[in-house]
Image: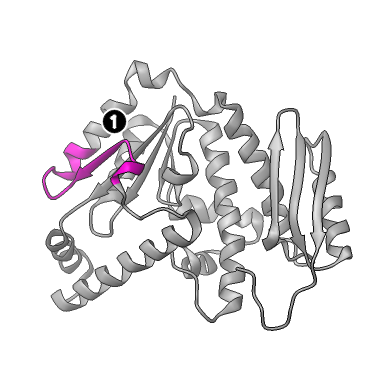
Amino acid sequence: MGVLTISRELGSGGDAIGKKVAEELSWELLDIEGFAEAARSYGYVRAELERVDERSPGLVDRFFRDRQLVYLDIMRAIVYECALRDNYVILGRGGNSLLSGIPGVFRSRIIAPEDVRQRRLVANEGLSASMAEEFLRHNDQERKSYTRYFFDVRWGDPGGFDLVLNTGFFEEEAVGRMLVRLMKREDFAKDAPSSSEELRNLSFAQKVKAALMTDDRIDASGISVECSAGGQLFLHGRVNSQDEKDLSESIAGAFEGVESLNSELVVMPPIEGWYPV
């Protein structure tokens, strides 16, 4: 019982390792395919996910930022829900940050030297050496900006992981075997994320926030949702109008599992030309 998160550099082999580990453990895998399937219930389609997935926010495109904020809340809801089921390998999706401190979660990172990553892209993707170098540089910068903007952490900081493995030193199969052995350890397996009250509260609050963010009648980007034990829900932050406030409280209050609702939402009409994100 447990959850393994895998952060990875492009060209490190992390995706293939994650898939292999999930197969060896007979665990579910949350990769881009699994995430796209889960996101369909929130109205997202694969093409739109690819546009915003693990990318830095646009500097000018307000629609892009709006959709990415919605995506982020959907992503959080899905990651929490998967972790609550136990026996999951979560590739990327901010899993190492979102599940920090949750018992039964092992956070790993897969890296490789830049020249190794570049050679793999040339061999596997048919790119020229110069194209592979530029592609890696751009991808790394996107992920750095994305992680800093949305999680306020430094992408790849080793302090955010339980283990960092270098596929320039270890073969991919060896890395996979190491992770499988670690996840099978008895002292680790005794802690299950599903037993965490903190995770249950986070997951419930995030489902409510995702429901608000995906409702086109509300600008919920300024709303924070918190949940304490017993389905006690707390809304705070800003909305654009009294109608949005009333609708937000109605949706949250009617959500299955809510026992009580406390709202401190403040109505703050938007100022033309100003975007609060």
Tell me where residue 91 appears, x and y as whole percent: 39, 48
- As drawn, 271 above or below 229: below
Residue at 67% of width from left, 46% of height from top? 207
Tell me where residue 173 appears, x and y as whole percent: 18, 40
Tell me where residue 20 appears, x and y as whole percent: 30, 41
Residue at 46% of width from left, 21% of height from top? 191
- As drawn, 126 above or below 264: below
Give the quadrant of residue 275: bottom right
- As drawn, 131 above or below 102: below
Position of residue 124 in the picture relative to residue 243 (left or right): left
Q: Is residue 172 magenta?
A: yes
Residue at 48% of width from left, 54% of height from top? 151
Q: Is residue 70 magenta?
A: no
Check the picture and name the quadrant holding the N terminus: top left
Badge 1 is on which residue? 180
* Mark 1 Cα shell of 10 Å, populated few (<14), some (14-19), many (≥20): some
Q: Is residue 244 visible?
A: yes
What secondary structure is marked by label 1?
A: helix
Q: Nearer the viewer, residue 163 or 124?
A: 163
Give the quadrant of residue 155: bottom left
Check the picture and name the quadrant holding the C terminus: bottom right
Give the extent of the magenta segment: 158-175
Tell me where residue 5 appears, x and y as whole percent: 39, 41
